[in-house]
Amino acid sequence: MRALYVIILLLCAGCSQNNLLTRQDYQKSREAFARGDTEKALLDFPGRRENGDFITTMEKGYLSLLQGKPQIDKLQKQAAWQENQVRFHVSREARTFFYVRTPEDYYPSEHEVIWLHFLLGWGYAQQGKYTDACVEARIASDLLTLPWSPSGHFDDSTMRLFLAGLWSMCGQWREAQVDFRAAWMMDNSLAWAKEVADRDKPPAQLFIVLGGPGPEVVWDPEFKLNPLRSGRRVSFRLQGRKSTLFMADQNGKIIATHLTPDAGKWYARHLVRESELDEIIQDSAYGGKAAASGIYAGGWIVASTGAGVLVAVGGSALSVGLMYAYAQSGGVDARVYLGGLALIPLSILKGIEIAQTGYQESTANLHKDLDPSPSYRFVRYLPEYMWIGWSDQPAAFPVKVSTPYASAIIEQPQVVNGIAVSIAHLPDSRSTSCTYNMNNNSYTLVTEPDANGNCSKNPDW
């Protein structure tokens, strides 16, 4: 069974590119972001590689906008490059995708391309360039509404709700109504979105709070007919808690908030789309990596197994040889024979230990080397969901928003055509460790929380 497991790992190898940023490179920045410290997240952002590429441009742009300090020059360059670069691809499952190829040979996901224009529109609005903001809103709207396929084009209720906020931000309430209504038509549980869409006049204040620290990608191999493709399979794990959000202005006035659907569908679409993208090229690269890593791991397993066999057989043979020589010399001390006999099983056990240790180290290193998730390429800093609230009367700023795990302050925004739109962020992330208090002493659980972010108390305490 162990040998079969090694063979499967060899077939299901993943690609790793040393010139790309990895999960480890983002660690400090991600930890700061999960605490809601966007300034430190940007300060600790990895800068050695991929500077100016699509992914890092999107991530830095998002972090700067959350601070109210729009850095959109590189976002503008990305948008200019992508103009007229959209192409179509129809899969065997009759789904339709649009692809954009960046100069560094990255194919952004559909939601990433649309968020590029969201970020640009948001940035223009922060700069007071509302006409330019509306242009970006129109581009994003076209990407969400153009009929790429009667049944398979990309559309999403949460993205429609943010687009409605962007239209409101640049003073186009009629356009905002269209997208609020579109969100409700896609998800009838969003009755509040229809309520907003039915208003002839916009509310005085519209609040959008972006939630979640962004998903993590994990290796999720699934052995099917094509082991190379299924072996490099990954999945996305959302990190946000989807907590209830409390919002109140400076005078204590409570503002009701509503939670949108999460971004799970964005990443499900991403995974389906990736499976259709350059399959042969990816399989070839994946197989090459498997062969190289497999030769190394297999060679080390053979070497360690051989060493174990040598120790086991050599030690036993040496013991028998010594006892034979002692008997031939006329020796009669029983302790010598007992010692020689004891050396045989000890040699065999030591040989087995060497072989097992070599096997375990080799398979562990193989798993580490071939797991594609640490270097998987995607835009990490994007929201997972949103809370939306509004007020018919001007709010007394600053407005405080909070969950049981974090809080933030919203400063007064600019009023455009009778409506003021505020955008804030709360990480609302799951804990990375569990802490308990007992008898005035603090105990920290070393293991991570479960999939729901819950901590289980140790019964021995």
Image (cartoon, grey):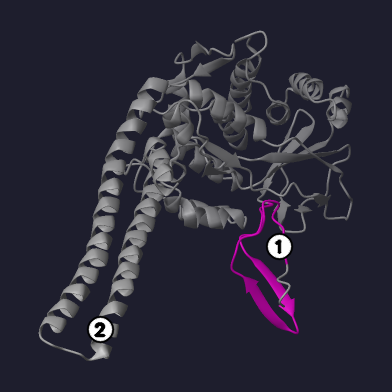
Mark 2 residue element: helix
In the image, residue 400 above or below residue 144: below
Q: Mark 2 or mark 1: which is in front?
A: 2
Query: At 35% across and 29% down in the image, what residue appears?
Result: 104
Mark drawn on residue 455: 1
Q: Quadrant of the C terminus?
A: bottom right
Query: At 59% across and 68% down in the image, what residue appears?
Result: 446
The magenta stretch spans which residues? 428-456
Mark drawn on residue 341: none
Residue 449 in magenta stretch: yes
Amino acid found under the numbered disc labelled 2:
Tyr
- First in sequence: mark 2 vs mark 1: 2
Horizontal relation, residue 399 to residue 446: left or right: right
Determine if residue 336 is in view: yes
Q: Who is closer to the viewer here, 356 or 105?
A: 356
Q: Who is closer to the viewer here, 29 or 286?
A: 286
Mark 1 residue element: loop
In the image, residue 432 above or below residue 420: below
Determine if residue 128 is in view: no
Q: On the image, which quarter does residue 9 sit in?
A: top left
Tell me where residue 169 appears, x and y as whole percent: 70, 31
Task: Tell me the crowding category of disc 2: few under 14, some 14 to 19, or many 20 or more residues within 10 angstroms, Cα based.
Answer: some
Mark drawn on residue 337: 2
Residue 116 in magenta stretch: no
